[in-house]
Amino acid sequence: MLKKADIVLIALNSPILIGIYVDNTLIQTIQSDEKSSNILPLLYKEILKNYEVQGLFFANGPGSFMAIKVAYIFLKSLSILKKIPLFAVDAFYFNENNPIKAIGKLYFVKISSEIKTQKLETVPEVSFRLPRVLDYNEYSKITTPLYMISAV
C-alpha cells in the first residue's frame, strides 16, 4: 500500500522545487535545473509510482510566464485525470515576501495583499523555499495563474 502524500511545486525559476509531504510534514525535496516542460512528467511519474497523492499545491505566480503556464497546465491536467484536488498560493509565500524579478529592473512586490510592479535598483538575491510544514489554510482552490503584467 502506498503512503498518502501531498505534493508542492515551485516552478517559477530554476531550480524547480518539489516537496513531498506526509502528515503535513516535508519528508523529501526534489530539485531540478531542467526545463519544467521536460522534467515535470518524469518527476511526477516517479512520485505517483511511490505515493498516493492526496493534494497538488503550487506557486501560481507571479514569475516567468512560461514557467507559470507549464506548471498550471501540467498540474491542472493531472488534477483532472487523477481526480486529485489542486490548490495554489502566490509565490511570495515561498520567498518571505521578497521582490520577484519581472523584467529589466521591474520587480513584483506584494504590499498588504496587493501585488504590483516596481522599479528597483538593488534587490537582494532571493530564493524560494519549501515550507517545513504544509499549512492548508495558506492555499486557495482558485488556481488560475497570476501573470500580473501583459505578455509582450
Image: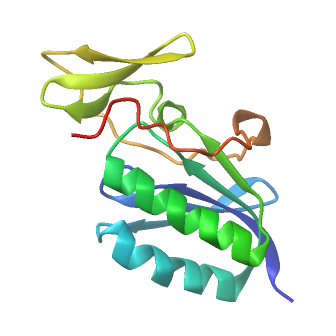
The quadrant of the picture occupied by the N terminus is bottom right
Q: Nearer the viewer, residue 147 or 108?
A: 147
Q: Position of residue 89 (x, y in %)?
A: 60, 39
Q: Residue at x 46, y 73 (%)?
A: 40
Q: Position of residue 54 (x, y in %)?
A: 80, 66
Q: Image quarter for residue 128?
A: top left
Q: Position of residue 49 (x, y in %)?
A: 67, 89
Q: Residue at x 34, y 47 (%)?
A: 65
Q: Image quarter for residue 82?
A: bottom right
Image position of 22 (left or right of 44): right
Residue 11 appearing in the image? no
Q: Position of residue 102 (x, y in %)?
A: 26, 33
Image position of 37 (left or right of 92): left
Q: Nearer the viewer, residue 26 or 89?
A: 89
Please tell me how many numbered marks the rendered image carries: 0
In the image as oriented, which residue stretches furthest toward the right?
1
- 122 lies above or below 53: above
Residue 132 appearing in the image? yes
Image position of 56 (left or right of 64): right
Q: Residue at x 57, y 85 (%)?
A: 45
Q: Residue at x 37, y 72 (%)?
A: 37
The quadrant of the picture occupied by the C terminus is top left
Q: Nearer the viewer, residue 152 or 65?
A: 152
